[in-house]
Amino acid sequence: MPHLRFGTDGVRGVASVDLTKEFVYCLGRALARVLGPDHLYLIARDTRESGYILEGAVCTGLHRERALSLTCGVLPTPGLALLAQEREAVGVMISASHNPWTDNGVKVFSLGGGKISDEQQSAIEDQLEQLLDEGDVRLDDMAAILNPGYAPGSADRYVAHLVDSLKGRSLAGLKVIVDCGNGAAFEVAPFALRGLGAEVTVLNADPNGRNINDGCGSTDPSGLARAVVELQADAGLALDGDADRVVMVDASGELVDGDKMLAVLAFDLDDQGLLAERGVATTVMANLGLRRAFATRGIELVETPVGDRYVKAAMDERGLVLGGEQSGHVIIGALANTGDGTLTGISVLDVMQRTGRSLADLASVVDKAPQVLLNIKVARREELQDAEAFWSTVSAVEQGLGDKGRVLVRASGTEPVVRIMVEALEPGVAAAQAEILRVALLDALGPLAD
């Protein structure tokens, strides 16, 4: 039986190959053992065809440990986090987020809707490993996977939360296109936007279990961009499979990513005197353009490792009300415990509505520096820290860039891959320097044989 490990956003794998129903059954048991069987466990899923059987498997594992579970059905991850918070429940989300339909995964929210702690995660992994090694999978259980009880009104409650987020304000007069990515928000996002008075056109809201994130949504907003221009919309929203992230498109079809949305929201909060500690948490991947925009405004950029769990931890530690990632995970602390793509989109549209400014105008505060990202497969990833010749090259590149660029190198935690990011203000420089680093890395660690 495959032994997957938790990453920065839960556990993921190929459905029925790595992430089997037996694995998820054991995970359900491990959750109940570590987090306790006396709590309510709320389960939700996105639209992948493997989601239903995995939902039943985790409920069966929880039941084996005498824990009560209810399913919310298809619901975005932030919707589950909200319900877990309101009902003092543990949340278990069956989703692989922006990955293709062939993958699936499990995210866990602790009591109150926050991400589980590192200590809880380690304990769950230990229990899971023990159960998998024991091979204690009750075949009679697996042959008759429980049909979990249903938590009625889950989607309605989440939609109400989204509408209430504007405190009576309206989006009337805004023409919006939302690309649901054939994912978990295919019903709730259009309902919420229409409930706020926007004129809404919906794309990719016909999930069939296999078309989630398939040439659509936040992973491919090109179709949305064309539609926004053709239909003369004010803005477009592109959600990923579980709708915890969003990217936007302005009226001319230009992409507005997480960096730019963070700036729009941060500047608006600052204008209202509501940006606590005058700081925003974001990751090491934040573009140089965002860093310069914040510096000009006197807003502190609180840097974290990649992963929204680290962003939220920094927000909690520093008392910040806003954080997010370039990828489109944005956490609006007054309204959510986790990234919420639909809520973020609504909040940016609200800024447009209140100020009378276009999305392009609002986002223009960030002049994005050219950024090159390389994912390089290497033979000896574990030798990265000791590769002196490579790090000498990194230092030389950094010195050459000075304050007009930066370099970030990090090894993947799960793959034989080293990621190199280079930014530079001058066009062409980032690509040229990234190629120098790629060659130096392969010289040091060797290419991975096919």
Image (cartoon, rainbow, N blue to C red):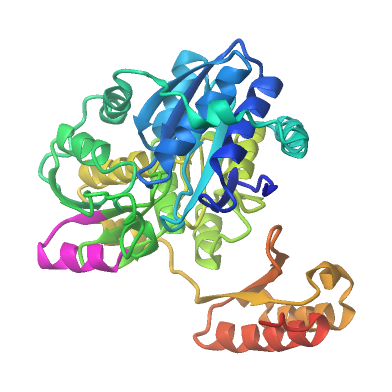
Vertical arrangement, residue 421 with respect to residue 319, above or below: below
Residue found at x 55% / y 49%:
299
x, y percentage for residue 322? 50, 40
x, y percentage for residue 88? 52, 15
Vertical arrangement, residue 98 with respect to residue 31, above or below: below
Which quadrant is the C terminus positioned in? bottom right
From this viewpoint, which residue is outermost toward the top? 38
Judge by depth and name the residue closer to the eye, 232 or 21.
21
Judge by depth and name the residue closer to the eye, 16 or 6.
16
Bounds of the magenta segment: 221-236
Can residue 322 be seen in the rendering of this structure? Answer: yes
Residue found at x 69% / y 62%:
412
Tell me: 260 left or right of 221. Answer: right
x, y percentage for residue 449? 71, 82
Residue found at x 55% / y 66%:
288
Which quadrant would residue 424 be assigned to in this image?
bottom right
422 inside magenta stretch: no
x, y percentage for residue 36? 66, 16
Vertical arrangement, residue 225 with respect to residue 342, above or below: below
Tell me: 370 left or right of 439. Answer: left
